[in-house]
Image (cartoon, rainbow, N blue to C red):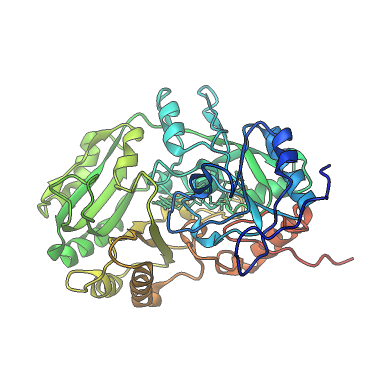
Amino acid sequence: MFPPDYRMQKIMAAPEVARREWRLDVIRARVDGRIVSETDEGWDTARKAWNLAAAQRPPVVAFPETTRDVIELVAFCRSQGLRLAPQGTGHGAAPLGAIQDALLLKPSQMRDVAIDASRRRARVGAGALWREVQSAAAEHGLAGLSGFSPEIGVVGYTLGGGLGWLSRRHGLACNSVLAADVVTADGRLLHVDREHEPDLFWALRGGGGSFGIVTALEFALYPVRTLYAGALLWPQERAAEILHAWQAWTAGVPDSVTSVGRLLNVPPVREIPEGLRGRSFVLVEAACLVAEGDGVELLRPLRELGPEIDTFAMLPPTELGALHMDPVDAVPAFLDGWLLRDLPPAAIDALLEAAGPGSGTPLHSVELRHLGGALADAAPEHGALASLDAGFATVTINRVMNSSQAALERHAAIVRSALAPWEAERNYPNFAERSFNVSDLFSPVTCERLGRIKTQYDPKDLIRSTHPVPTVQVQV
Ligand SMILES: Cc1cc2nc3c(=O)[nH]c(=O)nc-3n(C[C@H](O)[C@H](O)[C@H](O)COP(=O)(O)OP(=O)(O)OC[C@H]3O[C@@H](n4cnc5c(N)ncnc54)[C@H](O)[C@@H]3O)c2cc1C
């Protein structure tokens, strides 16, 4: 155990929380990984999230190298009265706020990726990125259920559901999880699967990061050598015609097709190719798990609308990461998203009025993702987020550049209120970029079960997560 004789000392002006100087010498002696505090070199880099708009000011940042390090860090936090916030990349950092009450645990050194090709499964460390998993899996003709951006952390994404280009065929990534290694708030290392700690296994699959620190995750891979994937782009003046045509087209496509209808105001940034930079487009992006001839046939009705740019081709799954053009490097970002029960033509008109040509919106990207297919199947063996009870999702992802974050938030709210008549009852955790109440994300029955599991595994609420599941009063 750690000695409780830390020196209380105010070391910086923080109105909300008195800062202390922690016994870092003790923890440094016990872990292999780097421990960084405010007075250390590299502090500003250490505390940063991928989303630079999240101004994180934790008292300490730790970079564990092993599971043993994680166990030591949990013991340290408990002895010092600190909470602990695991963070893979910080793509989902916005809802966490400044994190002034918790040690920020960044497992970026725990990046092992092992592919078991014969059993079609992957085992990855807590810090692995989807890019790393997809390139290792592709060597065996396999792919995991990555999101659109390959820079996202596998663990954070999967704990919050996991929606990507293969989703309509294979469902949410969380429901392809086979096992996890978890360090719990009392410092135990548990191997969790259907037979071992089944409640915790259920909660981790979509219920978020409230229940423990995941040090490794095992999940199913699917055979995918190539897909017919790409984007069709038209000038945004044609947005009404194209989005209506796309919406009608989605009604007839098989679940091998996952697509997006998108309004894109391309920011004038250097990573974007010159022909696109600074222009406004309406796009259809899609990934089709079909042979080329079938893909061409599927796309025909949209292609007949004469896109200015057509990038469709047979691609390996490793190239899907570039399709959506999400920013790779850390940027100040604003993301908002919510689910729609359905998307009748009137909803497209409402979206266009709020964010289409002539709306003056500062939002860079407003997209409609087609859901359904396997995403709608709530199989009994699934986890806490068993399915998405919605036909479409709306997502806006923006770099905070010339427009302030407040202006982007205001305009996202305008789009959301325009689509309110079609909004689904619940939100999707990974797109809920503000601190949400879990009752906005899950049914009352699921909330109640998540609360009981949180109370069992972390009764003192040591773990700080993006969408915290509160503990519940246990009846005696
Ligand atoms: C540009 C961009 C594109 C996106 N595209 C998609 C998409 O296509 N599909 C989709 O579903 N989502 C998408 N998202 C949302 C993204 O999946 C979530 O933000 C997700 O939480 C990111 O996971 P992370 O580990 O990278 O982020 P982090 O911010 O590091 O993690 C988010 C949360 O996960 C939990 N967590 C992370 N690691 C651990 C751990 N080891 N143990 C316990 N808890 C942990 C913590 O609560 C943490 O706060 C996108 C977000 C951005 C910014």
Q: Position of residue 304 (x, y in %)?
A: 11, 52
Give the answer, above or below, for where 368 lies relative to 288. Answer: below
Residue 192 visible in the snapshot: no
Q: Is residue 143 left or right of residue 199?
A: left
User: Which residue is pictured at 78% across the width and 51% down the height?
Assistant: 6
Q: Is residue 242 left or right of residue 221?
A: left
The quadrant in which residue 241 appears is bottom left
User: Which residue is pictured at 33% across the width and 48% down the height?
Assistant: 326
Residue 137 visible in the snapshot: yes
The quadrant in which residue 245 appears is bottom left
The quadrant in which residue 392 appears is bottom left
User: Which residue is pictured at 68% across the width and 39% down the height?
Assistant: 70
User: Which residue is pictured at 16% across the width and 62% down the height?
Assistant: 236
462 or 299, which lies in front? 462
- How many tags in the picture? 0
On-image quarter of the C terminus: bottom right
Q: Is residue 309 left or right of residue 127?
A: left
Q: Position of residue 291 (x, y in %)?
A: 27, 34
138 or 57, which lies in front? 57
Q: Residue furthest right?
A: 476
Q: Position of residue 74 (x, y in %)?
A: 73, 45
Give the answer, above or below, for where 341 lies relative to 145. Answer: below
Q: Position of residue 402 (x, y in %)?
A: 28, 64
On-image quarter of the N terminus: top right
